[in-house]
Amino acid sequence: MRGSRLVIPSSMRAEVLQKLHEGHQGIVKCRERAKNSVWWPGLSREIEDIVKTCPSCLKHRIERPEPLMPTDFPDRPWQKLGSDLFYWKGVNYLLVIDYFSRYIEIAKLSSTTSEAIVTHLKSMFARHGIPETIISDNGPQYASSTFQDFAKDYGFNHSTSSPH
Ligand SMILES: [Zn+2]
């Protein structure tokens, strides 16, 4: 024994490792399980290895995409905005939504360049103020240096945080 944990002889370690990983729990859960039951030198490391190389876990991880990250609810209107483009009946539009109030702004686009998006956002900011954060996808309009410069000039954070 080591404290309240059984010390497992080397000949049985592979089998016990499999048991610890039964149910295909992650590293943390498997270590927790071991902490209450068994021990041998290097166990923690071996748990990490078996979880990281488990074929079944690997397959599962690939098939299931990362969940969307929920974002913190803002404190006031027009603090955090989401921005995206959409296409409807032959016309492109810019959509901006305020996370606090769900208020939306829509602008009809004659072009989908970064410059066009920036022009329309400036117009919205002139009416409602400059937000702290804009969240968008990684579309070319938002990933461009034009947009990065705009964010820097106007002093808002630009986040493309989900998917992580
Ligand atoms: Zn597994």
Image: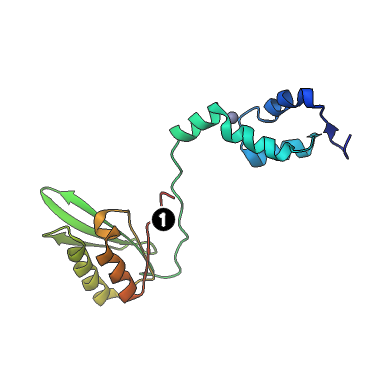
Q: How is the image coloured?
A: rainbow
Q: Amino acid at mark 1?
A: Ser
Residue at position x 41%, y 49% in the image: 163
Residue 141 horizontal/vertical position (percent): 24, 58
SS state under label 1 = loop
Residue 21 horizontal/vertical position (percent): 66, 30
Residue 112 horizontal/vertical position (percent): 17, 57
Q: Is mark 1 within 8 Å of ligand 1?
A: no
**Above or below, comparing residue 142 to residue 53 in the picture:** below
For residue 51, side relative to residue 128 (left or right): right
**Above or below, comparing residue 37 to residue 147 in the picture:** above
Nearer to the camera, 65 or 127: 65
For residue 115, side relative to residue 153 (left or right): left
Residue 89 seen in render: yes
For residue 17, side relative to residue 126 (left or right): right
Residue at position x 10%, y 49% in the image: 90
How packed mark 1 is, by other alpha carbons closer than 10 Å (few <14, some 14-19, many 20 or more), is some
**Image quarter of residue 101:** bottom left
Residue at position x 63%, y 32% in the image: 50
Which residue has dot 1 on it? 161
Residue at position x 43%, y 39% in the image: 65
**Above or below, comparing residue 27 to residue 100 in the picture:** above
Nearer to the camera, 62 or 11: 11
Which quarter shows the N terminus? top right
**Above or below, comparing residue 153 to residue 159 in the picture:** below
